[in-house]
Amino acid sequence: MNTLIRTMTLIIFLVAACQPIESTNVSASTPEIIETAITQTRTVIPTQTEVPIVIESQGSTKYLELPEWVRRSWPGGILVLPYGDAINDRPSRSILVNPDNGETFIVDLQKEFYHYYWRDNEHVVFFHEGDCGGSPEIISELSVFSGILQEYETKNHPEYVLGCYSNSDDEIVRLNYKFSELAVEFVDPSNGAISLLTDPNDGITDISIELSPGKNFVAIVQFDGDFKFPESRVPIYGNQISVYDLRTQRLILQYAEEQGILSETSFIDYSNLAYIRGNTPCLIMILSLLKKCIHNIPNQFPDSTIILSKNSHEDTTLRFLYFSQQQGGYCFYNINTGGLGCPTDRFSTFNNQIVINYSLSSFGHYLLVEYDSDGCPVPWCDYREKPRLGLIDLYDGELFELGLSDNFYLSDFFRPLHPDPWQPWR
């Protein structure tokens, strides 16, 4: 990650005994435009390796000859994506990408799959013969360290089956859709007991939730008044935001806004929350019970829509997407120094392109972006012309173009890309 950004530390305020106070807005002057760690703008087209040789096959187990970088690609980890010809509904291949040099490697699973996930930093699990409405009939597991591809019947390994779009381990808070006004439930991790965190009859609809990295806090975007969810995919806005301490299950902060609050929020670290008010990012510093809004960002991109990115939680950087009718990119803003940088703006490949989706590797070393010349992120747009994928090494300043994203079976319903394609760091 950018050395400059990594060396900055966030000032943690002492817990205030008084009521929450809104701080003075951050200066509206033009922010300092900082140079990122990118020193080159070299574009490399990776050479695609053929399907790996099957050394040995014993029933449902195959032993594949994988390249050395698959087993030893650190610190960023390897990238795993579904891969095919974009003709079939489901792929039967997966492509491995080396983020250090853009090299790719194809694994033929021989069975079509509809979902996959990293079980840990060594194993990728694929779901076959089913759909996200139920459980897969068959699963296969690839060990990226040993090259063993093992097929199982699901009934023999129920612990491998995770939901298609969520990880049940994270669901200590969840929205209950049974109430006419959506409410938030808390699931006690010690005993599984379920209790209501918010009142389903208080005239306030809970729209979205965001759990802090340490699972101590939850942010809830709400609408105070009559609210009806739209029938089509459009951006959803509330008019207030609340923060609960999950250790005590108590409301500790609440802010109402005249401008709409976008339902997508993001924790910068364990106790600092970012949200979008109108088109302006705001920060809630939970430990000090303060809020400040950053006008520098919309001033730098006056005709653009600002969307928060998920953060790496390892620095003091606010990450975001911006887009207009002509241009869009991926940027970061240092909340201590006011420094602003957009890695995608450093490459001519992204001229007159809009970044419509992204995925950041562990500790922010690499950035995968999906971009298009005619479109924008969902739900602001529901169409794409010819979206492509690019892999950026944020340390060395290299861009590797991976080709049309339709070949990678990416979903436009989730931002960032889901499931997470990056090898986890743990």
Image (cartoon, rainbow, N blue to C red):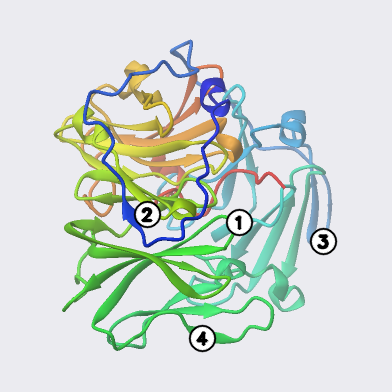
Circle 1 residue: 117
Q: Amino acid at mark 2?
A: Thr
Residue 149 left/right relative to 383: right
Circle 2 residue: 265
Choose top left, top right, bottom left or bottom right for residue 232: bottom left
Camera-near label (3 vs 4) is 4
Compare residues 224 and 73 and report the one nearer the observer: 224
Circle 3 residue: 59
Q: Amino acid at mark 1?
A: Tyr
Label 2 close to label 1 by CB (< 8 Å): no
Camera-near label (1 vs 3) is 1
Residue 369, image x and y in percent? 42, 35
Q: Amino acid at mark 4?
A: Ser
Circle 4 packing at 10 Å, graded few (<14), some (14-19), many (20+), is few
Camera-near label (3 vs 2) is 2
Residue 408 left/right relative to 65: left
Q: SS class of the residue under badge 4?
A: strand
Sequence-wise, which precedes: disc 4 or disc 1? Answer: 1
- As drawn, 84 above or below 103: below
Q: SS class of the residue under badge 1?
A: strand
Camera-near label (4 vs 1) is 4
Q: SS class of the residue under badge 3?
A: loop
Point out which mark residue 247 bears.
none
Compare residues 408 and 306 and report the one nearer the observer: 306
